[in-house]
Image (spheres, rainbow, N blue to C red):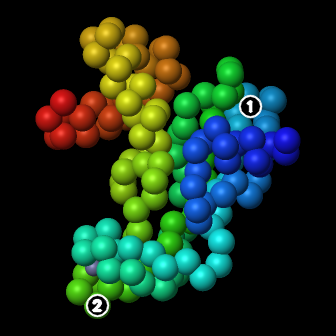
Amino acid sequence: MKATDLFSRILGLTEPWFVEVVDLDTVEGRVDIRVEHGPGVRWSCPTCGRELACRDHTKPRGWRYLDTCQFKTFLHARVSRVDCPEHGEVQVKVPWAESKGRFTLLMERLIIDVLTEHATVTGTRRILRLTWDEAWGVLERAVRRGR
Ligand SMILES: [Zn+2]
């Protein structure tokens, strides 16, 4: 099995998203996964659900994913934007993250679980190799969501 197929499967990506490139950097200890979508996709406006053609894409964005063994793992994608007659130019939802998140949903959940278990940001940062800003950002979003 090719690395791109392997990661498409273990990430649980579904149409139209697929893994285009997987880069392993053994010096930096990281895996970078570039995700793309096929052509001619109709996207839903995140507010009203209206199906629209792709207008353009965001600049490449990155999300930290769960580690692959000991390697920090990052997902990268250019997210489609649509031009909704009601809501204007908006970015579509991606299945792996919240609209403004810097982590995938699974990574964010792990951070919250470790924070809950250890109750200190310092311990959570050390275990998951996060910066202060990253750990606080996740904590603040979780508090806003009322968890
Ligand atoms: Zn809309």
Where residue 137 appears, as percent x and y from the top left, is 32, 37
Side of 2 relative to 41 (left or right): right
Q: Quadrant of ligand 1?
A: bottom left
Where residue 139 appears, as percent x and y from the top left, is 27, 31
The residue located at (42%, 84%) in the rendering is 52
Q: Is residue 98 above or below residue 64?
A: below
Please tell me whether mark 2 or mark 1 is closer to you in this view.
2
Where residue 60 appears, as percent x and y from the top left, is 58, 62
Q: Respond yes or no on whether mark 2 lies under 8 Å from ligand 1.
A: yes
The residue located at (46%, 33%) in the rendering is 107
The residue located at (52%, 46%) in the rendering is 63
Identify the image quadrant of the N terminus.
top right
The amino acid type, in three-letter code, at marker 2 is: Pro
Disc 2 + disc 1, Cβ < 8 Å: no
Instruction: Using the numbered discs, state the Cα–Cα distance from disc 2 to disc 1 in whole angstroms.
Output: 45 Å
What residue would you read off at disc 2? 85
Observer-nearest of 26 and 41: 41
Observer-nearest of 102 and 66: 66
First in sequence: mark 2 vs mark 1: 1
Q: Locate residue 36: give its quadrant.
A: bottom right
Per the image, label 2 sits on a secondary structure element best described as loop
Q: Is residue 11 visible?
A: yes
Query: Which label was assigned to residue 28?
Result: 1
Where residue 147 appears, as percent x and y from the top left, is 18, 30
